[in-house]
Amino acid sequence: MAMAYLAWRLARRSCPSSLQVTSFPVVQLHMNRTAMRASQKDFENSMNQVKLLKKDPGNEVKLKLYALYKQATEGPCNMPKPGVFDLINKAKWDAWNALGSLPKEAARQNYVDLVSSLSPSLESSSQVEPGTDRKSTGFETLVVTSEDGITKIMFNRPKKKNAINTEMYHEIMRALKAASKDDSIITVLTGNGDYYSSGNDLTNFTDIPPGGVEEKAKNNAVLLREFVGCFIDFPKPLIAVVNGPAVGISVTLLGLFDAVYASDRATEMLIFGKKLTAGEACAQGLVTEVFPDSTFQKEVWTRLKAFAKLPPNALRISKEVIRKREREKLHAVNAEECNVLQGRWLSDECTNAVVNFLSRKSKL
Ligand SMILES: CCCCC/C=C/C(=O)SCCNC(=O)CCNC(=O)[C@H](O)C(C)(C)COP(=O)(O)OP(=O)(O)OC[C@H]1O[C@@H](n2cnc3c(N)ncnc32)[C@H](O)[C@@H]1OP(=O)(O)O
């Protein structure tokens, strides 16, 4: 895909000088959390978060929280059953009693999960204890976490090399919109597994609506325009942590990030199907800085943590000043390219390329 204007912008981008670093293994932290049961600390953080709920979660959820809290701290219900007219205490007793012999640890985990699922309705988490790791649920294709001023949006289809299917396009847009409004200072996109992303999921082209391929191409153009538009308009510093190879739309988007850090394991496939190494992409201004794969995560996250301590308003305003002149033009180019692509998706060349890929492993 030739995005001439972006390519021109990228060619002007220079690699900034090094910044100081400290240790910040965010990825490891996240993996440990998911692999283990909720700790007492997680439980206490969740109790604090409940106090910050902006919206009333409703009686059903409050009863569930009460019951899980009692079960986690005292074990199975040990109170005499209240009388039928003591409605409130009876409802609480019923909820607790319904948990039966659920172990304390499981109740603690369920409590943490339940609070985590309520996180979109949390009050500004600037009031949340520093260092608290909040994980947003409700995403099928992403893992979204917020910690130490950094919202991390991680593509999470590693078995498909993080190919972007229709659901993932929508979820990325949703995550970006939420990140633009949350209390994080910077937003990071990265990939889970050995790829950053293999670009558009080519099976997207096989799901043909009743209006046929023309309707499909039109829908794709609308989706792509909105998707790229979210990146053009994103108000906070946006950083790509390119952990492995990047292909197609995932490369094109890099031009809309404020910094792109790449592992030297990353290769990018660009115009004319040429593969660029991360070093070559850096020399061309597409990548800000390249790190050896062995130290990539540690060095990059350390640096990002330092960024996230910078004054948030100054960062936002600087981005606005730098980007506002080009935003209108980028939207115009985006609209034009989506129109062109709508036609290209109906071409024999595109059909053949998709069929060739899908028929490699008899996916057709
Ligand atoms: C709204 C529409 C927007 C359109 C604009 C966007 C345009 C683009 O992004 S164009 C670029 C599209 N991407 C590609 O053409 C890449 C296709 N993939 C590959 O060439 C290769 O898979 C690879 C080089 C990325 C990796 O090769 P390899 O290491 O040999 O691994 P596999 O091919 O076995 O892949 C593992 C697994 O993942 C599936 N997969 C990988 N990429 C995609 C993809 N882009 N779409 C769909 N599926 C993908 C692959 O089929 C394998 O699946 P299984 O066979 O089920 O294991």
Image (cartoon, rainbow, N blue to C red):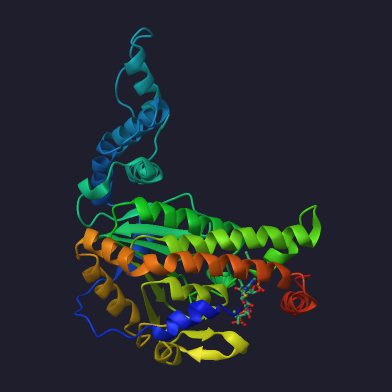
For the view shown, which residue lies furthest in the top direction?
Answer: 85
Residue 301, image x and y in percent? 29, 73
Residue 196, image x and y in percent? 48, 75
Can residue 110 be seen here? The reply is no
Residue drawn 72% across and 73% down?
A: 344
Is residue 182 left or right of 51 when viewed as pictured? right
Q: Looking at the rendering, in which quadrant would you find the N terminus?
A: bottom right
Splitting the image into 4 quarters, where does residue 79 fall? Answer: top left
Residue 171, image x and y in percent? 51, 56
Does residue 251 lie above or below 138 as drawn? below
Q: Give the image quadrant in which the ligand numbered 1 is located.
A: bottom right
Is residue 243 left or right of 73 when viewed as pictured? right
Residue drawn 29% across and 41% down?
A: 123
Can residue 91 be seen here? The reply is yes
Does residue 331 lie above or below 240 as drawn? above
Q: Looking at the rendering, in which quadrant would you find the C terminus?
A: bottom right
Residue 226, image x and y in percent? 55, 58
Residue drawn 25% across and 74% down?
A: 302
Is residue 226 left or right of 348 when viewed as pictured? left
Is residue 3 left or right of 324 when viewed as pictured? right
Q: Nearer the viewer, residue 276 or 145?
A: 276
Splitting the image into 4 quarters, where does residue 9 fall? Answer: bottom left
Q: Nearer the viewer, residue 221 or 86?
A: 221
Q: How many marks?
A: 0
Residue drawn 28% across and 84% down?
A: 16
Q: Nearer the viewer, residue 14 or 60?
A: 14
Q: Nearer the viewer, residue 232 or 336?
A: 336
Splitting the image into 4 quarters, where does residue 308 fall? Answer: bottom left
